[in-house]
Amino acid sequence: MVTPVIETRELTYTYPDGTRALRGINIKLTAGQKIAVLGSNGAGKSTLFLHLNGILRPQGGKVLFRGSEIRYHQRDLLALRKNVGIVFQDPESQLFSASVLQDVTFGPINLGLPQNEALTAAKEAMRQTGITNLESRPTHFLSYGQKKRVSIAGVLAMEPAVIIFDEPTACLDPGMALKTMALLDELSRQGKAIIMSTHDVDRAYDWADYVYLLQDGGVIGEGEPQHVFLRQDWLDRCDLKCPIVVETYLELTASGLLPVNMPVPRNKQELFQNIRNASPASAPLLKTVRHG
Amino acid sequence: MLLIDHYAYSNKLSTVHPGEKFIFFVATVTICLALNSLATSLAVILLTGAAVILLARVPWQVYLKLMLLPASFLVVGVLTVAVTFTRNEGEFIWAVQLGSFTAGVTPGGLEFAGKMFLRSLGAVSCLYFLALTTPVTQMVGVLRWLRIPSLVIELMVLIYRFIFILLETAGHIYTAQSSRLGYRNVRTGFHSFSQLVLSLFVKSYRQSQTVYDALLARCYDGRLNFVEAKYRWSWVNIALIIAADGALTACWLIAGGV
C-alpha cells in the first residue's frame, strides 16, 4: 500500500474556551489525491487544517507526515510547514506585506533559499497563478480575486507536497472560481495532494476523488463521492443537499428512464451521455435535427 | 494620507532608484535648513514643486492642496513670531497701543517670520517630494540600506499594511451602521461611533491572531525576511541631483547669503 503523505490518527482538540473542536479524527491522503472536506460552519474543518500544518498541536492522537509521527520540535515543524501549505479563506489574513513580490517570496526566504532562488520560485508561482503583472503593485490596491491569487502564489512558491485550500472559491466571481478550480486540477496533475473545504456539493462531487463529511468535530462519513453522496442519512446530518447530478440520476432511475443497474455518473457529461444512450429515440432524433 | 500613498505608487518617478530620490531629499532639505535665506528657500520650494509636478506628473491641483495644508498651519505659527510686544518705542510698520504695551510688526520681525515661513515650507516640500515619489515598500529598502534596526523596519512594514486593513474594516462597519441609520443624529452618531471603535478593536485582535497563524504556516521564525526589488542607479539622475543642489548653493553664494 502507498504510504499516505499526511495522516491523522484519533485527533482530538478542545479550545481553551471549552469548545470541543475535534473528537477523534482520522483522515489520510496520498500524493496526487483530491480530497474534499464538507461540513457545516463550526464542524471543525479549519481546526483540522491548522493541525495538518502544525499550527495547532493535538491534545490527543497524532499527525503523521510520510509515515512518521510529528514530534513538534523545530525541525519537524519546519519540514511539515514546508510540505503542507494552507491557503486561508480570507486573503487579508494571509497577506502581511504591502508589496506583492515580498509577500510571495516570504515563504521561500524562510526556507533558507538564497535571494535569487527565492525569486525564481516566486516568479514561477506568480506565473502559475497568473499574477505576473501584479508584481510591483501594492497589496492594498488589489481586488479581492487578485488578493486571493497572491495568497495562493505565496503558498505555491514554497513548493509544498500538500496544499490545503480553505473554501477557495468563496466570494469569487464564477469566472475566477473556474480558474481557481482549473489551477487546483493542474496542481493535482503535478502530483500534489490537494485538500479543499467547501459548502458547494456540486463542485465537490465533480472534483474530488475522496470525500470526508465532518460534523461536530468528527468524521461521520467518508468515501468516494459517488458513494458518499448516495447516503442521504449522512447528508441530512451535515445539512447538505444532494449534488444535482446524483439527484437527477436517482430521479431518472426511479422513474425507469435509466436502467437501475447503471453506475452513478461522475459528472454532468457522464450523466448526459447516459441519458443519450438510454433513450432509444435520441439517435434518429438527433439526426433529423441535424439534417433539418 | 491615502492620496499621498496613491501617488507614491502611480507617479512617473516610482521606478527610479529609491536611493536617488532619498539623496535628493537629504541634500535639498539640508541646503534649505542650513542656508536659511529667503531666496534659497523659495528656490527649494520651486525646485521640488517642479520635480513633483513636471517629473513625477502629480497633478498640480493635488500638489497645491497638499502644500496648503502645512502652509495654513505655518501662517498661524509665524504670525505670533511676526508680532512683537514691547514697552519701548520702536520702528513699527503697523502697531496698536495696549495700555503701556505696544503690539506691532517690526521690519526685523517680519523678515524673520518670512524666512521662517519659507524655510519651513521648503523643508516640507522636500518631504512631500519624497513621500509623493517613493512608495513605502521602496523606503523600506532605503532604511535597510541605512542600517536601521530590522525590528523597527518590520514594525513599520506591518503597521503600514495594517493601516489599510484597519481603514477598510472601519469603512465596512461604518457603511453597515449608516445603512441602518446609525448616524441619523448626533446621539445615535456618538453611540454608533463608540460601537465602531469597540468592534474595530475586537476584530483587529482576532485578525492579528489569524495573521500570526498564517505567518507560522509559511515557516515564520520571528524575522520577516524580504527580497528587495532591484533598481539601477542612474548616473544621469545623480548628475542632475548634483547640478540642481549645486545650483542652489551657488545662487546663495552669488547673492551673498541673503
Image (cartoon, rainbow, N blue to C red):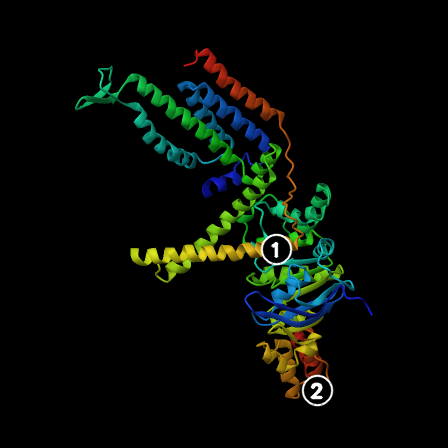
> What amino acid type should be assigned to the residue bearing mark 1?
Ala
Q: Front-most of B133 and A133?
A: B133
In the picture of the structure, the residue carrying the numbered disc 2 is A260
Q: Label 1 crowding class (10 Å Cα cut-off): few <14, some 14-19, many 20+? A: many
Q: Front-most of A126 and A265?
A: A126
User: In which chain is the residue bearing label 2?
Assistant: A
What percent of the width, then of the height, locates residue A149? 61, 54
Picture layout, residue B34 above or below residue B54: above
Could you tell whether A73 is left or right of A180 in the image? Answer: right
Determine whether the residue tagged by mark 2 lies in a helix, strand or loop: loop
Work out which quarter of the rendered image holds the C terminus of chain A and state it.
bottom right
Query: Does residue B183 appear in this view?
Result: no
Work out which quarter of the rendered image holds the N terminus of chain A and state it.
bottom right
Q: Front-most of A256 and B32?
A: B32
Q: Residue A126: which numbered mark, if any?
A: none
> What amino acid type should be assigned to the residue bearing mark 2?
Val
Query: Residue shown at 44%/22% (left/top)?
Result: B43
What percent of the width, then of the height, locates residue A224? 71, 75
Q: Label 2 crowding class (10 Å Cα cut-off): few <14, some 14-19, many 20+? A: some
Picture layout, residue A84 above or below residue A233: above
In the picture of the structure, the residue carrying the numbered disc 1 is B214
Q: Report how many numbered discs are placed on residues in the image.
A: 2
Could you tell whether B42 is left or right of A34 in the image? Answer: left
What percent of the width, then of the height, locates residue A62? 71, 66
Query: Residue shown at 48%/19% (left/top)?
Result: B248
Query: Residue shown at 68%/65% (left/top)?
Result: A195
